[in-house]
Amino acid sequence: MARVYNFSAGPAVLPEEVLRACASEMLDYRGSGQSVMEMSHRSAEYQAIIDEAEADFRALVGVPETYKVLFLQGGASQQFAAVPLNLCALPGASGKADYLITGQWAKKAYQEAARIIDAETIASSADKTFSYIPTCADLPVRADADYVYICENNTIYGTVYHELPDTKGKPLVADVSSLFLSQPHDIARYGVLYGGVQKNVGPAGLVISVIREDLIPAGPVDGCPTMLNWRTQADAGSLYNTPNCWAIYVCGKVFKWIMAKGGLEAMREHNVAKAKILYDFLDESALFAGTVRACDRSLMNVPFVTGDQDLDAAFVKAASAAGFVNLKGHRSVGGMRASLYNAMPVEGVEKLVAFMKDFEAAH
């Protein structure tokens, strides 16, 4: 078997140690005689799996007791509607929210919210194809806004908030899908932090939401489907209905893998080192160029171009043949993109840069 270097933005590379551990338990999970994919989510065996996963996640991230951790279905995109439906139904809510639009996913979240509430854009980088993060020091946050929303790392465009915006006391809601568990998260600075796990944590089909308890409705909400009401899953321990049992199980393995590697601070150091290798090359290259303002560069997603669409396509094809796969940029922007998630080894980035140097020399 030959493993490729997978630079996909998601579903993305997972640690080999985790994949092997899952494979070893595929047919018989710890003497139960069944796979995790077969067992009842109401069984004692599965209750132990989800309890351990939540406990490890809380310890790894440092989640305060005043926050709920929910394992939800529908991916991050389903939270685009769940966020306004829940937060704008709290006592005293105005039904208004302010959004910072720094990429496609923030834009989609805003558009979904605007179908339900009075959503307003208070900052945007659309004027330069989302290649930078707007200044966030003095945002025009509305006095009666229920929350302020950001997508913290923009997968498609390769930008990231290196400093969280000043929300002027309003709860900050952040989609952290593309940088989830790649660095420490100061949970107390967020009202709601959520991420689809398929980019850096586990298999597709699961979103982990960390929600301050006072931001969860006390009961049913008019106009909010039962499955989108955070109270439904909070009261049921994420087991109101059959959850994505397998994804939660794999995520639990990844939590332990990160702990064994030294935790989230060690992950940040690992990711800084990898990104530096690629960015240093791009800054010196005569052929390839990064597309993001240097001060706003993501450690997770690195978009780059040659300036010639045909040459971009030739590079992607040659790279794939050489074992560097999923480097084609998102269909909305073209070019190339290398996603350097936790499980991507330094060796993979070093070999990619060596290949890029050879391609540059030949062209």
Image: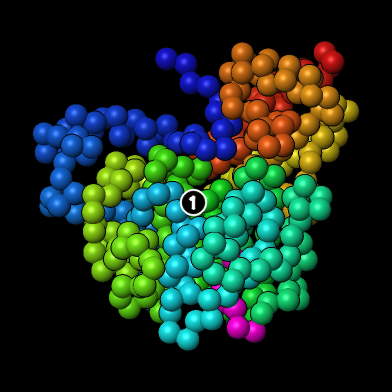
User: Going by the image, does 49 lie left or right of 291?
Assistant: left
User: Label 1 is placed on what type of residue?
Assistant: Ser
User: Going by the image, does 180 lie left or right of 30?
Assistant: right
Residue 186 shown in magenta: no
Above-or-below relation of 90 to 310: below
Q: Residue at x 57, y 37 (%)?
A: 9
In this view of the protein, which residue sits in the foreground, 356 or 69?
69
How many numbered discs?
1
Q: Residue at x 36, y 72 (%)?
A: 222
Above-or-below relation of 77 to 122: above
Residue 147 shown in magenta: yes
Residue 62 visible somewhere in the drawing: no
Q: Residue at x 85, y 34 (%)?
A: 284
In this view of the protein, which residue sits in the foreground, 333 or 96?
96
User: Going by the image, does 158 lie left or right of 57?
Assistant: right
Q: Position of residue 24 (x, y in %)?
A: 26, 30
Identify the image quadrant of the N terminus. top left
Q: Which residues are magenta?
A: 143-149
Above-or-below relation of 125 to 62: above
Disc 1 designates what residue?
77
